[in-house]
Image: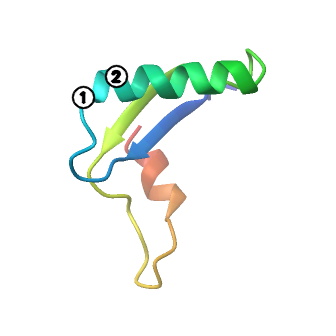
Amino acid sequence: MGEGIKSVVQLEADVGEMSEQAQDLNNYCRERLSKVGAPKNVDFCDEFPGAPSGKLIRRKLRDEY
């Protein structure tokens, strides 16, 4: 309860306009996932929070939102 589906994306350098990338990602998800399973919005970040081993620390990512 109280949680929603959000997409957080780390872009490579020189990818282009973020709004175009977000729209492309939303269209891709809507075509392949159910309406309930598709993310409602897309956020972009420079770098994901990670452990020294290189694994993603999901707890820190969730705390930002």
1 and 2 marks in contact (CB < 8 Å): yes
Image quarter where the C terminus lies is top left
Q: How many marks?
A: 2
From the top left corner, tell me how far across and down residue 61 is, in percent. 44, 51
**SS at circle 2:** helix
Q: Is residue 18 left or right of residue 61?
A: left
As drawn, the label of residue 17 is 1
Closer to the camera in the image, 63 or 40: 40
Closer to the camera in the image, 20 or 6: 20
Q: Is residue 12 left or right of residue 36?
A: left
At x 60%, y 29%, the residue is 5
Closer to the camera in the image, 5 or 16: 16
At x 66%, y 19%, the residue is 30
Q: Residue furthest right?
A: 34
Q: Residue furthest bottom?
A: 53
Quarter of image, res 32: top right
User: Which colour style is shown?
Assistant: rainbow
Question: Is the residue 56 above or below the residue 62 in the image?
Answer: below
Residue named by callout 2: 20
At x 45%, y 41%, the residue is 8
Instruction: Classify mark 2: residues with Cα within 10 Å, few (<14), some (14-19) or many (20+).
Output: few
Task: Specify the amino acid type for callout 2.
Answer: Glu
